[in-house]
Image (spheres, grey):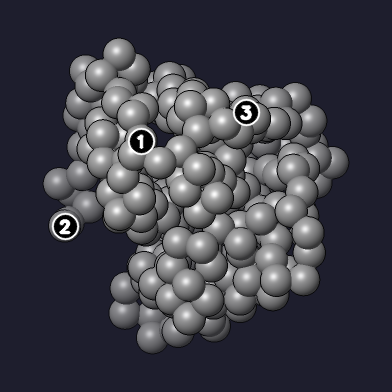
Amino acid sequence: MSLSSIDIDAQLDRMEAEGPIDLAAVDYSVRDARVVREELGPSLDYFARVEREVERNVLELQVLLPQADDTTRRFIRVWEEQELPHGWVFDRLQAEVGLPPSQPELTAISRSLRVAGALAHLPGVHDALMFLYLSVGAMHERLTAVGYDLLRKRLVALGARGFAETAVGPIRGQESTHFAYYRNSALLHRQRLSPWQLHLCRVVRTRTYRPIGATTPANAAAFGRVAGALAGDAGVDRFVSPVQRVAQELLVREGAGLQLPPFVARALREALDLGRAAPPARTPGGIALV
């Protein structure tokens, strides 16, 4: 795809026309609630929490990107309208199989994000923060897509085909649309960055990357347990390659000849190790932009 063919406004038009998923069409029936609860309980809770914490993510973005343009603000509005129902349907399924609802953190904003936002008025800083936001958004969406593909297969195998087809399928489709927005916007925005800005973004991302919703040790452990449950410990590599490819495409200009270190694999394997060692816990995460 050439950059000249990217039409962000048209992408947003399609997102707005699609709207949120149809909550009334979701089928929550399961063949054996106990099996779903025992096999997928932590996974359902993680998906529900991360999706519902979009409400806080919007507040974080207002702090981090005070100079965001109208196009970005439009995307954030539509994105929130589509993402929040994703969390609601997972909480409803948890209730149907006898689990408590997720406990998202909806108001706390980390000190690091506040500091970054305070520096956004400095020359070059806001553009770098915007690129970090767009590029990590693309990486998170690719990671999420793999997770939804694996979850959908497990739900079908456990007798919850209705939910897999009426909820996970449509949600997965919307996440793909969000990925396209993030990726294309990042490619366009990268043209505005000087070499030092892009280098800074590479350093920040490769040194601080964490899986979506896993910015604390407790949540990283929770992600590790989910990844292990859905893909098996050896299968976690299924998450690694797609996300690393997105990072390579966006953080390195074409023809630069630079290969990023395997930072995605490092972060996911650290999460797996934490998941094996730590007991289950529910604590707030964050958007992991910086």
* CA gap, disc 3 and disc 2: 42 Å
* CA gap, disc 3 and disc 1: 18 Å
Q: Dot 2 corresponds to which residue?
A: 1
**CB atoms at circles 3 and 2 under 8 Å apart?**
no
Residue for point 61% across, 64% down:
224
- Three-letter code for the amino acid on which mark 2 is drawn: Met
Of 227 and 160, which appears nearest the observer? 160
Q: Residue 201: percent from the left, percent from the top?
A: 59, 62
Q: Residue 168: percent from the left, percent from the top?
A: 32, 39
**CB atoms at circles 2 and 1 under 8 Å apart?**
no
Which label sits in the foreground, 3 or 2?
3
Q: Residue 264: percent from the left, percent from the top?
A: 54, 72
- Three-letter code for the amino acid on which mark 1 is drawn: Val
| Above-or-below relation of 73 to 170 | above
Q: Dot 3 corresponds to which residue?
A: 101
Residue for point 50% across, 43% down:
34
Residue 74 quadrant: top left
* CA gap, disc 2 and disc 1: 42 Å
- Side of 33 relative to 218 (left or right): left
Q: Quadrant of the N terminus?
A: bottom left
Circle 3 packing at 10 Å, graded few (<14), some (14-19), many (20+), is some
Q: Residue furthest top?
A: 24
| Above-or-below relation of 275 to 258 | above
The secondary structure type at the circle numbered 1 is loop
